[in-house]
Amino acid sequence: MIPPSILILSLLEVELLDFAMLLKLQNMETVAVITKAEPHESNTNYAQGGVSAVLCPLDSVESHMQDTIVAGAYLCDEETVRDGPDTVCHGVDTMNTETQEVIRFISKVTLLASGGAGHIYPSTTNPPVATGDGIAMAHRAQAVVSNMEFVQFHPTALADEGLPVKPNKARENAFLITEAVRGDGGILYNLSMERFMPMYDERAELAPRDVVARSIDDQLKKRNEKYVLLDISHRPREKILSHFPNIATECLQYGLDITHQPIPVVPAAHYMCGGVRAGLQGETNVRGLYVAGEVACTGLHGANRLASNSLLEALVFARRAVQPSIDHMKCSRLDLSASSCWARPVVPNSLGSDVIDNILKTTVKVRKELQSIMWKYVGIVRSTTRLETAVGKISELESQWEKHLFEQGWEQTMVGLEAGEMRNLFCCAKLVVSSALARHESRGLHYTIDFPHVEESKRLPTIIFPSPINSTWSSRQVHKLAIC
Ligand SMILES: Cc1cc2nc3c(=O)[nH]c(=O)nc-3n(C[C@H](O)[C@H](O)[C@H](O)COP(=O)(O)OP(=O)(O)OC[C@H]3O[C@@H](n4cnc5c(N)ncnc54)[C@H](O)[C@@H]3O)c2cc1C
């Protein structure tokens, strides 16, 4: 057992390391920074557009605020809500993936910065680490979760199946074709080379992300096709190559010259606007638990994130969490006895390698099935019937998977990377479906054909309260949630 004063899971790179430095400078005992994979494997490392800021004299903070509120479909909390803390976070259990050793950290403060949950969908721009672990962990730790129905799909990720030469291996995360291509005059066509965006919105290709994603989704469904085409080849070759060098190089590797040919694109899950509900200083309803970055729902993004606001939000909230964390550490005592409050996880070595291989193979299959259910029934355009179908299918899939694990001798306290991610993916998928079912209107990123309009009376966040303490490792508790 290692007792740091503060535990950071995981890294908003510069800002969190700054955070750690600040605490060290104040002689605050130990700080542990935990991450799941290589430090560069994070959404932060893939960010392309940068951080929004007001730099131009013609711009103003007020207009940035207004843009944020409009993009957020008027659901942004101008002051985020605080729920009085009633439970305490004592730290986390972790597994060293190199040595397979389980290490329990008991800490006064835990800051979750574990990113989003893009991998609940089959196609996502997020790296493989984005399996919603932080949201699921916080949910199990009795934290309030909010706005999970608002999943942002980027309209234009590279559609590998439309490339002249197919990649040898399926990509773990979709390659993003930046919006700047549309901003620079890129035109969207269906596979019959019909320009379709003007039929959906007078702003055509320059319509906001959610409108473009829905329009593409409609074309794909109506025409039963797998991708659409984004053409920039009418622009001068040297401009294309100087504005989009990475896209040009990536496509050329697969036999596609973007200065002559259109790019096959498809929407992909990109950003989770919902997450662990946080106050203005990153605090949650669980004492000692702070959140920053995509895992958090601060209310800033409302129902739809304004592009480039996420890094800004992450930096601001990580910084804001410093002082309350220090205050909390000063006035609380490290409760080492908490270590006996919950069962210690064990690595399933006793099961033998054949059994573990079998479980891993099944888990890979189940993960794909869950992703396909989410894309088919909880995608860009939703309906009550499809969401209800998803509830049934996810529940059945999860029961079958847990039954399989049980039959193989898997015990409740056993842990493994793939199994842990699977449980967290199930948990986040169910949080998205429950939240989507609870919203009887279409707002921002949540669009349902059964309630196609914005309803002023429903301009409230979706709040998922924790269920009574569940001592098992199962993620099924979400079915019992009260949602308002
Ligand atoms: C392709 C792409 C382009 C983008 N472009 C922009 C942009 O231009 N501007 C902008 O503002 N936003 C952009 N975004 C969104 C933005 O990058 C993310 O919202 C932001 O980086 C999230 O930061 P984070 O620190 O919360 O999560 P991440 O940067 O994803 O970091 C999460 C960390 O937590 C670790 N972790 C996860 N689970 C566990 C676990 N169980 N145990 C231990 N560690 C764990 C991971 O290993 C990782 O290190 C983009 C996103 C993508 C995918």
Image (cartoon, grey):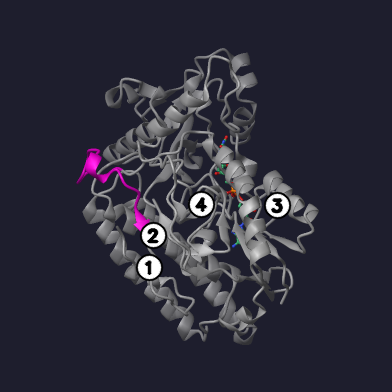
SS label for mark 2: helix
Task: Check mark 3 vs ligand 1: CB closer than 8 Å? yes or no.
Answer: yes
Residue 34 to residue 127: above or below: below
Q: Is residue 9 visible?
A: no
Extreme residue toward the left, this view: 450
Marks 4, 2: nearer the viewer: 4
Circles 4 and 1: CB atoms closer than 8 Å: no
Q: Are marks 1 and 2 in contact (CB under 8 Å)?
A: yes
The residue lying at 61 percent from left, 79 percent from top is: 338
Of the residues under marks 4 and 3, which one precedes in the sequence?
3
Q: Quadrant of the C terminus?
A: bottom left
Mark 3 neighbour density, 10 Å: few (under 14) some (14–19) many (20 or more): few
The residue lying furthest to the front in this view is 331
Q: Which mark is residue 39?
A: 3
**Residue 478, labelled with which disc?**
1
**Residue designated by label 4:** 296
Looking at numbered disc 3 in the image, what kind of residue is underneath it?
A: Pro
Q: Please, is residue 342 above or below residue 106 in the view?
A: below
Q: Residue under label 2, please give it.
A: 431
